[in-house]
Image (tube, rainbow, N blue to C red):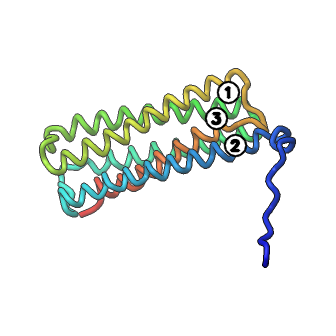
């Protein structure tokens, strides 16, 4: 009879000595599971565009505005990355500065979506196929951006109080990963709504 070798379970003493590592792993797993489930949701939204509208993109779609929105969001991803890197290295000033830039760029993106809606409403009423997809997809994405902005404001406030150090930066890391997810979602939304066809 053969017995499979198993790694010994960590003792309670080891868990008490490094509770941060255990909690950090659970936090990261939970975040990745959430982001995976949310990506399925966005995948369904994008598939709906092709079901309702096919591959044709109306000529009235503002290509320059779509490109500006994409550029703003991609730039915010860079500043978010720099904020996280600053938090990891204990650079409080760099963390605050880059988080603030990310918040400002995210707010600019939301203003741009408002402009997009104002321009699009006359060409694509919400009861048309393309209008339904445009307003639903950009609206849900904008909700995610606003949620990210609120989370960024919270971690900015915590960072202002000096809560992050080289060993304690999970809130900043988690929020920045969520922000990157929101940016990646837009990278798929942009061609689907603006370029296909």
Q: What's the distance in space between the residues labelled 2 and 3, CA to CA?
A: 10 Å
**Badge 1 or badge 3: first in the primary sequence:** 1
Q: Where is residue 80 shown, x and y percent of the image?
A: 58, 41
Q: Residues within 10 Å of mark 2 (few under 14, many from 20)?
A: some
Residue at 57 percent across and 38 percent down: it is 175
Q: Which mark is residue 24?
A: 2
Q: Where is residue 196 shown, x and y percent of the image?
A: 28, 62
Q: Indicate the secondary structure of the residue bearing disc 2.
A: helix
Residue closest to the eye, 113 or 34: 34
Q: What's the distance in space between the residues labelled 1 and 3, CA to CA?
A: 10 Å
**Badge 2 or badge 1: first in the primary sequence:** 2
**Badge 2 or badge 3: first in the primary sequence:** 2
Left of 2 or right of it: where is 67?
Answer: left
Q: Where is residue 36 shown, x and y percent of the image?
A: 48, 53
Pointer 3 residue: 171
Residue lying farthest to the top in this orientation: 161
On the rendered image, what quadrant is the C terminus found in? bottom left
Residue closest to the eye, 172 or 100: 172
Residue closest to the eye, 52 or 24: 24
Left of 134 or right of it: where is 144?
Answer: right
| Callout 2 touching callout 3 (CB < 8 Å) | no
Pointer 1 residue: 159
Left of 10 or right of it: where is 131?
Answer: left
Image position of 102 with respect to 1: above or below: above
Q: Indicate the secondary structure of the residue bearing disc 1.
A: helix
Q: Residues within 10 Å of mark 1 (few under 14, many from 20)?
A: many
Residue lying farthest to the front in this orientation: 1
Total marks in image: 3
Q: Where is residue 10 shown, x and y percent of the image?
A: 81, 50
Residue at 59 percent across and 33 percent down: it is 99
């Amino acid at each position: 009879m053969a017995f499979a070798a198993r790694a010994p379970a960590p003792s309670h003493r080891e868990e008490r000595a490094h509770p941060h590592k255990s909690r950090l792993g659970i936090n990261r797993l939970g975040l990745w599971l959430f982001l995976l489930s949310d990506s399925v949701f966005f995948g369904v939204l994008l598939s709906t565009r092709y079901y309702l509208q096919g591959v044709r993109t109306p000529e009235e779609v503002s290509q320059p505005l779509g490109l500006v929105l994409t550029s703003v969001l991609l730039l915010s991803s860079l500043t978010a990355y720099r904020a996280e890197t600053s938090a990891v290295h204990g650079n409080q000033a760099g963390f605050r500065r880059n988080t603030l830039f990310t918040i400002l760029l995210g707010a600019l993106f939301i203003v741009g979506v408002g402009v997009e809606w104002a321009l699009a409403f006359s060409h694509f009423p919400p009861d048309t196929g393309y209008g339904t997809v445009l307003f639903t997809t950009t609206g849900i994405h904008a909700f995610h951006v606003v949620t990210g902005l609120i989370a960024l404001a919270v971690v900015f406030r915590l960072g202002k109080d000096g809560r992050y150090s080289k060993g304690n930066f999970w809130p900043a890391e988690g929020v920045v990963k969520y922000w990157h997810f929101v940016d990646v979602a837009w990278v798929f939304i942009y061609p689907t709504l603006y370029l296909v066809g």
